[in-house]
Amino acid sequence: MRARLLEATVELLVENGFSGTTTTLVSERAGVSRGAQLHHFPTKNDLVVAAVTHLTERRGEELEAAAAQLPAGKHRTRAVIQMLGDHFAGPVFTAALELWVAARTDKALLEAVAPLEQVVGRETHKMTVQLLGADESQPGVRELIQATLDLVRGLGLASTLGDDTRRRRRILDQWARTLDGALVPTSTTDETDGDHQ
Amino acid sequence: MRARLLEATVELLVENGFSGTTTTLVSERAGVSRGAQLHHFPTKNDLVVAAVTHLTERRGEELEAAAAQLPAGKHRTRAVIQMLGDHFAGPVFTAALELWVAARTDKALLEAVAPLEQVVGRETHKMTVQLLGADESQPGVRELIQATLDLVRGLGLASTLGDDTRRRRRILDQWARTLDGALVPTSTTDETDGDHQ
C-alpha cells in the first residue's frame, strides 16, 4: 500500500506538477482510503519527502537496468550518452524536476531533496565513469564526465518544454565524438578490453 | 506602473516560486493599488504571461550588456563560456525556470512561454556563434554550440539546488578548452584541414 501511494505521487507529479499533486488525488489514484493514507503519511510534505526517496531508488534502478543492455565496442560511448540522454528526458527526471523546483522555495522539502540529490549525483557520475572506461587521473577527464551529466540535465529540461528528439540526437552524436576524442581509454597500453575501474 | 508590476512579478517568482506568486503580493511589492493592478492585469495568468515577455527582454539585455564587456584574444572562449554560465545561474534564469516548470502542466501558460522560449533560444545561439567566431559550416560545430547552451542550462538548474561555484568553474574551464580544440575560427577557415570532429 505504501509503494502504491508513492508510485501514485510520482505519477501525479509528472501529470499535474508539484502544486497540482494533492493528498486527495494521491489516495484516489492509489485506490487507498483517506484514513489509511493519513495513517502512512499525515501531511503532503510527509508523502512528498517519502516519494523523493522512492524516486531516487527508481532512478538508480532505471539506470542500472539500461546500463546492463549497453553494447561493447566502438559504439559504446554513443550508447552510454544515449542512455543518459533518455534517462534525463523521461518521466522519472520530470518528477525529480518538479521536486527540485518546489524545493528551491520550500525549506523542509529542500532538506529532504538536497542530500539525496548529492547521492544520486555522485552515483550517476561513478557509473558513467565506469561505463565509459574513463580514466579520471587524466587532466580534464573528471570535468568532461561532469559536463556530460550537466549537458543531459540541460537537454532534459529543454525536453519538458517540447524540445524535439532529432535536435537532441544530433547533439548527443556530436558529444559522443568529442568525448571519444578527449577521453583516453585506460586500456590502450596493455590492450585489455574489460573493466575500466 | 506596468513595468513596476512586471518587475515585482519577476522578483516574487525568484523568491517564492510560481505557486507562491500571488496578485496580492505583486501589488504590495510594486506599491500599486489592487484596483490599478486589476485594471492592467485582471488575472494572475495575464500578469504572468506579460512577465514572460518582460523577462525575455531582460534576458536579451543582460546578455548583450555582458557580451559588450568581453575581452578579445586567446582567453575569449573562456570569457564567453563564463558569461553564459553566469547568465544561466542568475535570478533571471531562475524566474524563467519557474515559468517553464509551471508551463509544463498549464496549457495557457505554455502557449505564452513556448514561442518566446524558441525566440530566446535562437537568439542566444546566434549570439554565441558570433561571440565565439564559430564557423557553423564545419561539421559538428552547430551541435557543439547547442551542447554549450544545454550545458549551461543544466549547470543553471544544478545551481538552483545549491551547486557550488568551484565545481562550475572547473567544468567551464574544461569545456572552453574542449571548444577551443574543436572550433575552427572563421578567420582561419582557409587553412583548415576540415578534420575537426
Image (cartoon, coloured by chain):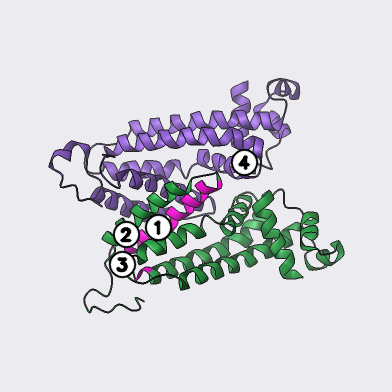
Chain colours: A green, B purple
To which residue does mark 2 refer? A179
Residue B48 appears at what percent x and percent y? Answer: 64, 32
Q: Residue at x 78, y 54 (%)?
A: A25
Q: Pointer 2: residues within 10 angstroms few (<14), some, or many (20+)?
A: many
Q: Pointer 4: residues within 10 angstroms few (<14), some, or many (20+)?
A: many
The magenta-colored residue range is A132-160
To which residue does mark 3 refer? A74
Residue type, label 2: Leu
Identify whether B71 is placed above or below A67: above
Residue A132 appears at what percent x and percent y? Answer: 36, 68
Mark 4 and mark 3 residues within 8 Å of each other at the beta carbon: no
Numbered badge on residue A148: 1
What's the distance in space between the residues labelled 4 and 2, CA to CA?
A: 34 Å
Q: Are marks 4 and 3 on the same chain?
A: no
The quarter of the picture where residue B14 lies is: top right
Left or right: where A50 falls relative to A177:
right
The quarter of the picture where residue A150 lies is: bottom left
